Image (cartoon, rainbow, N blue to C red):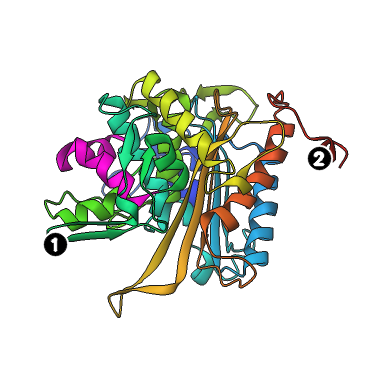
Amino acid sequence: MVFEKEIGAFGVERALDEILAGKDGHRTSMTNARGLLISPEPSVIKPPRPGMNIQLTLDMEIQSIIQEELLAGIQEHQAPRGCVIVMDPRTGGILGLANYPAFHLNTLDDIDTKGINFATQMVYEPGSTFKAIAAAAALNEKLITPRTPIYCHNGYYRSGKLEMKDHHAYGTLSMEQVMAKSSNIGIYKIASQLGMQRFYQYARDFGFGSRTGVALSGEVNGTLRPSENPTTFSSMTFGYAVSVTPLQIASAYAAIANGGKLYKPQLLQAVITNDGTPLQRTEPELIREVITPQAAAQLRQCLKAVVTKEGTALQAAVPGFQVAGKTGTARKFNTQRKVYEKNRYTVSFAGMLPADDPAFVCVVVIDDPQTQKVTRYGGTIAAPVFAKAAARIARHMHLTPTEEIPKSVADQ
């Protein structure tokens, strides 16, 4: 009887198929010209190796939380797709990864239309979550501090053919306020102190433009191309003219959370034999130190200002904790018409909690929401999904609140 070998077709099963599937055995014997076994020449027998079991880094309670909150956010804001990722910034371990839509894992229904892993296979222009890269680089190079004043030209900037506008007419803002209010002009002027090449190199060092190497099949690179064009460079500083995956954003923010170290995202925690014996444990894999602990701490301080009344992400606040993070709102590009759509957006929020010593990083991306109930911004759609998920995750992780919880919230 011949058994057909099952092969992992996608996801973890495909990426780790060699571990899961095991290896066939074989017997080698000598025969004569008529095909008869030559005796007493012994056969050479290599027994089969059974497939191993794997233990993932996923926390199933966290996985359940983000699946529920993602689905609620998708339904409330009438979006066709979205993603939530939760990472342990100290190890790179992925604690939860939820995509919508998703296919049925047993029946494989709709796999042709729902089989794309948004977290690693869908690219998007991140918008203002990418501003953290220029800010991190400038802080690391000691070109600025969180208090450095940046003149934002009252909402309109022009230099030669380069022209840009802000959503409000800001005058002089501190670097911290540039992040809190998400000034495009402000972040461009910060990045200009770095120069094109240094900015590009920092973006590369944070992992953009290349696969993370996570144990999931079909991961894509995203796009990060160096350019001497001033308009392209300015666009990149605030998250256009670059494409990323949600996992790349999560990895970069994990580096900001842990003091500047970029870790390879991990899904495989251990290889286990069929009798339950741990055979191999996966250790955290440090890729590089991108920025110093001091620069990372300064940037987290700036990102805390985002989640305040003066910032764009007040709705990302979690009672009892300080949150650090950044909103992102990017117009969707119509590849057929070669224009940016006026009323279609990808909105996101990348955050960490507690802000001063983050236990986890959580990235929420909602693509093309159609709701008319709220303005379609990262701060009004993605940030509330983060807040609801992060509050539940903090309780699950038994994190001790660092801030006073309002009585009205505590009584709920």
* Numbered disc 1: secondary structure: loop
Q: Callout 2: few (<14), some (14-19), or many (20+) C-alpha neighbours within 10 Å? A: few
Q: Quadrant of the N terminus?
A: bottom right
Task: Tell me: residue 256, above or below residue 293.
Answer: below
Q: Quadrant of the C terminus?
A: top right
- Residue 5 picture location, percent across and down: 49, 52
Viewer-nearest residue: 343 or 222: 343
- Residue 212 picture location, percent across and down: 37, 41
Three-letter residue code for mark 2? Val
Three-letter residue code for mark 1? Lys
Task: Tell me: residue 304, above or below residue 35.
Answer: above
Which of discs 2 and 1 lies nearer the camera? The answer is: 1
- Residue 152 picture location, percent across and down: 32, 47
Q: Would you say residue 204 sits in the magenta stretch? A: yes
To which residue does mark 1 refer? 161
> From mark 2 to mark 1, how far is it between C-alphas?
51 Å
Q: Callout 1: few (<14), some (14-19), or many (20+) C-alpha neighbours within 10 Å? A: few
For this view, does 381 lie left or right of residue 208? right
- Residue 261 picture location, percent across and down: 38, 25
- Identify the residue at image location x=59%, y=62%: 102
For this view, does 1 lie left or right of residue 401? left
Residue range (magenta): 183-207
To which residue does mark 2 refer? 409
Please indicate, yes or no, whether residue 108 appears anywhere in the rendered image: yes
* Numbered disc 2: secondary structure: helix
- Identify the residue at image location x=62%, y=63%: 74
